[in-house]
Amino acid sequence: MTTRHLRPEDEFEIRNLISRYCITTDNADADAFMACWVPAEQFGGYDSGAFGTMKTWKELYEFEKHHVAPGGTANGKRHQATNVLIESVSADEVRVTHDMLVFEVAQEPRLVATGRYDASVVVRTPAGWRFKSRKLHVDPGFFVLMEQWKKAAESVAR
């Protein structure tokens, strides 16, 4: 795979799509987040590892509404995409791989999770480039941190 099929404006739009994906989550805007995706009938699925697998557009929408709501795991966080790799499949389809950094910003600022979106399928639609499917691999250190938080909460509760 190469970027030979991509015009510079396509790469720019795809990079903006990735940023919009993160920012709409940070802004708790589930509707704008879902606008980053193809229509429901073209949806190819979202596997977020430990957070679940959504096979339909509607399942992802319900997940995102809960994810960004007060008490949701994205609340008070900032998501950043790094190491973005765009590989052309055709003039109308690319695979995007990038790392994800999640920072706590509502409390003491710190890095709380890392992972990689591996070979997301992004397609050209009449509305522009949109995600068709994604798979998130959450790094193992996140689960170590979650276990530490759980133990700390239990010791405070005693």
Image: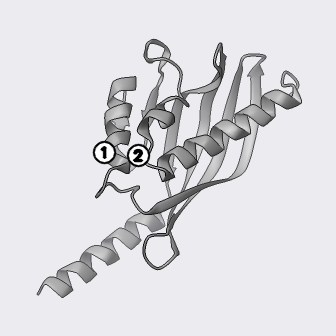
Residue 93: quadrant of the picture = top right
Q: Residue furthest left?
A: 158
Which quadrant of the figure has residue 155? bottom left
**Residue linked to disc 2:** 49
46 relative to 13 in the view: left or right: left
> Residue at image x 44%, y 33%?
31
* Residue 56 can be seen in this image: no
Q: Amino acid at mark 1?
A: His
What's the colour scheme?
one colour
Element type at marker 2? Answer: helix
Above or below residue 114? Residue 19 is above
Secondary element type, mark 1: helix
Q: Position of residue 14 (x, y in %)?
A: 71, 33
Q: Residue at x 47, y 20 (%)?
A: 43
Residue closest to the eye, 75 or 90: 75
At a point 35% along the width and 69% down the height, the residue shown is 146
Instruction: Write down the residue under mark 1.
Output: 66
Q: Position of residue 107 (x, y in %)?
A: 43, 76
Residue name at image x 79 percent, y 27 percent: 10
Q: Position of residue 153 (x, y in %)?
A: 23, 79
Residue 151 x/y as whole percent: 25, 79
Mark 2 or mark 1, which has the lower sequence index? 2
| Residue 85 visible, this angle | yes
Q: What distance separates the C-alpha of mark 2 from that of mark 1?
A: 17 Å
Q: Are marks 2 and 1 in contact (CB under 8 Å)?
A: no
The quarter of the picture where the N terminus appears is top right
* Left or right: 79, with 148 as reference point: right
Q: Which mark is residue 27?
A: none
Quarter placement of the C terminus = bottom left
